Amino acid sequence: MNELVDITPAIDVMESEYKRLLGYPSDYILQEQVRDLMNGTIRWYAENGGPWIYARQAAKLEISDERLKVDEIEFTSKRIHDQLIDAQAQSIVMVAVSAGKSLEERARQLWKEEKPDEYFLMEVYGSAVVEHLITTAGARLCEWGDQQKMAVLPHYSPGYPGWDMSDQDGLLRLIRQKKRHDLPEEIQVLESGMLQPKKSLLALFGITPHLERVRHLTTLVPCENCSMPSCQYRRVPYKHPHRQIEDVRQLQFRGRDELNRSVRNDSALGPDAKYSINLRGLPTSSVDDSLRSTTRLVEVYRPVGKD
């Protein structure tokens, strides 16, 4: 495999994955209003979204002692270094996926229109799309690897446990260099390490010809983190997803009952509290919107009974 560009990947987010990211238990029966809003979000994205996948195999991989270099760019993660050593990996595939900037723009518009439910569902759906895209990319790599008698290791990204977010910029530079095709859409790394558009993900997939090592070391099998149904290359059942770099639960208003419990526990946000936001982690164009959003959140979380 040299390079892959897909600007029209099929998006088929399983309802169970969408519900999981929304914070619902797997057996929870959705209320009609929530289901209508979810379906409306899915329809809007099907008509207006811009998902894409980009992947490229590195020309050179160097692993020695505590050092990991891919095409002359060095990374700091001991965890992925050790994973590649354990699997005796001989190659790396860099992957970038994104739900597209149109989703982010739509979410911002919904917030400005004071539609917090629709905003939240759009934000979470974007995260679900990113998970689906990286799963799709992994499945395609597994198919290619099977033909080459190679095994694909679980993907890993800056911001996951054991890999500092500061390597995000280096990974993006690695993806951009030596490519024959441009990325379908521009991606930037903010000073905080987060990506713009934020519903995007950069990742590395290790490739090894030593199939027996992957079979015997379950930590090197990507299937446990892959929700792709009916995959012909699956070796073990899907158990749990990767931790999200962006915690979507922070976007969710949890309702009056939980708010009342917080008040009783003396832990609720109050109108006299001081609030702050890290402006360094935001693009310049979003600063004014974020300040207005902060004011709105103070109003939303005003404790019951307070003026």
Image (cartoon, rainbow, N blue to C red):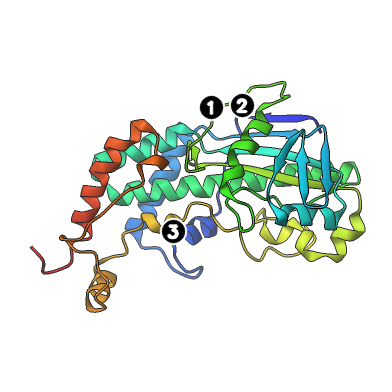
Q: Residues within 10 Å of mark 2 (few under 14, many from 20)?
A: some
| Residue 65 makes an appearance in the image | yes
The numbered disc on residue 121 is none
Q: Nearer the viewer, mark 1 or mark 3?
A: 1
Q: In the image, residue 122 lies at what x, y percent? A: 40, 45
Check if mark 2's residue and mark 1's residue have beta carbons within 8 Å: yes
In x, y percent, where is residue 272? Answer: 15, 61
Task: Give the position of the C terminus as an image quadrant.
Answer: bottom left
Most extreme residue toward the left, as rendered? 307
Q: Is residue 107 left or right of residue 42?
A: left
Residue 269 spot, x, y in % from top left = 24, 64
Amino acid carrying mark 2 in the image = Leu
Whether the residues at callouts 3 and 2 have beta carbons within 8 Å, the answer is: no
Q: Earlier in the sequence, mark 1 or mark 3?
A: 3
Q: Classify residue 256 by image quadrant.
A: bottom left
Mark carried by residue 22: 3
Name the residue carrying label 1: 186
The N terminus, quarter of image: top right
Q: Give me the residue at 41% from left, 47% from top.
A: 123
- Mark 2 lies on residue: 183
240 or 36, which lies in front? 240
Marks 3/2: CA–CA distance: 30 Å
Where on the picture, by quarter, is residue 34? Answer: bottom left
